[in-house]
């Protein structure tokens, strides 16, 4: 069993691109991350060099695992076995020294954390930062009942509102790393990938749809202000973003939900989303 590491996203895609595209649901985060880096440069998330890697069970065999690491964010694990994840932890510790954590399919994340050398020595503790379920759209269903209002693409005039909502969304999911919400919203409005649900002439919710990569698009973020929840706005805007992704050519439309939020899990299933696999992101802290 062997991992091959590189700091070059193009070299990584040359070796692992076919594997990523063959399993777009399991590799959804890696696909959108690589698309983002291709458009914004390899240091789009910071000055530290990113790292990528692919795993083969035997030299010359097919690629069966992949990861990406863009500090200061946790290591993102694509489709891989628990054994590959454990091997990766030991290798990355030797090569990079420290990471903020790891996120991917539950079994792989737990195996990575257990094998991380300082964790094995009791010097690092892995704590759950995000417990999610990945859903795939089977067939898009209209919200029932249909909420008041209608969807539309986000416009530059929405910028101030969407910047505030983006920050509120990140705070709600517990993301503590700094984010330039203004730049993020500007880029997504320009790309036409943010959608607003409007009721009575004012925005009341928003959702994003990532660019189609390898036939895959992922819905998110999704946010409704607390005082406007329970009116079906999230269902309406997610349905609209999903329809946009399908119209853009996506054959796989995906989204993540917080397992601790039964309301959102129920909403998305009613729209036609079906569970694929559970994901777990672990943060490493001093033991």
Image: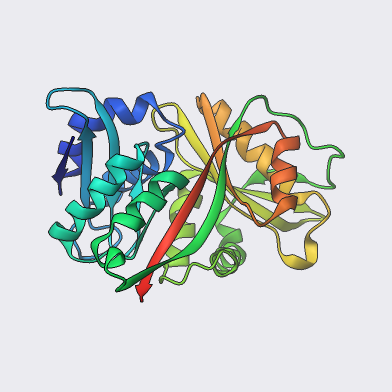
Direction from residue 287 to residue 250 in the image, left or right: right
Depth order, front residue of 103/49: 103
Residue 50 visible, this orientation: no
Residue at the far bottom in the pictured view: 286
What residue lies at 23% left-to-right and 66% top-to-bottom?
A: 98
Residue 85 is situated, as x and y percent measured from the top left of the image, at 30, 45
What residue lies at 41% left-to-right and 70% top-to-bottom?
A: 177
Depth order, front residue of 42/90: 90
Q: Is residue 259 above or below residue 241?
A: below
What residue lies at 53% left-to-right and 65% top-to-bottom?
A: 170
Direction from residue 141 to residue 246 in the image, left or right: left
Depth order, front residue of 72/162: 72
Residue at the far right in the pictured view: 145
Q: Quadrant of the N terminus?
A: top left
Q: Is residue 75 above or below residue 211?
A: below
Image quadrant of residue 168? bottom right
Q: Is residue 279 above or below residue 229?
A: above
Residue 54 is situated, as x and y percent measured from the top left of the image, at 22, 37
Q: Quadrant of the C terminus?
A: bottom left
Direction from residue 30 to residue 228 in the image, left or right: right
Residue 231 is situated, as x and y percent measured from the top left of the image, at 83, 53
Residue 169 is situated, as x and y percent measured from the top left of the image, at 58, 63
Depth order, front residue of 125/149: 125
What residue lies at 57% left-to-right and 27% top-to-bottom?
A: 246
State how the image is colored.
rainbow
């Amino acid at each position: 069993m062997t991992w091959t590491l590189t700091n070059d996203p193009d070299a990584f895609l040359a070796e692992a691109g076919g594997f990523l595209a063959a399993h777009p649901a399991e590799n959804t985060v890696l696909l959108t991350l690589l698309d983002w880096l291709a458009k914004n440069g390899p240091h789009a998330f910071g000055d530290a060099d990113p790292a990528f890697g692919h795993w083969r069970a035997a030299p010359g065999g097919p690629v069966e695992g992949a990861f990406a690491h863009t500090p200061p964010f946790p290591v993102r694990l694509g489709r891989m076995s628990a054994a590959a994840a454990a091997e990766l932890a030991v290798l990355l510790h030797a090569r990079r020294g420290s990471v903020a954590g790891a996120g991917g399919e539950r079994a792989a994340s737990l195996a990575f954390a257990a094998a991380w050398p300082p964790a094995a020595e009791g010097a690092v503790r892995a704590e759950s930062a995000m417990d999610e379920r990945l859903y795939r759209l089977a067939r898009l269903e209209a919200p029932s009942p249909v909420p008041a209002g209608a969807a539309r693409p986000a416009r530059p005039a929405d910028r101030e509102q969407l910047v505030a909502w983006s920050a509120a969304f990140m705070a709600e999911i517990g993301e503590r790393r700094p984010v330039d919400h203004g730049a993020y919203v500007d880029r997504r409005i320009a790309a036409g990938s943010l959608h607003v649900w409007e009721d009575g002439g004012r925005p009341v919710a928003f959702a994003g749809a990532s660019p189609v990569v390898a036939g895959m698009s992922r819905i998110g973020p999704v946010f409704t202000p607390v005082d406007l929840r329970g009116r079906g706005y999230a269902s309406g805007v997610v349905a609209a973003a999903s329809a946009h992704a399908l119209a853009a050519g996506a054959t796989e439309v995906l989204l993540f939900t917080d397992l601790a939020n039964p309301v959102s899990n129920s909403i998305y299933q009613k729209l036609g989303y079906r569970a694929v696999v559970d994901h777990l992101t672990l943060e490493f802290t001093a033991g």
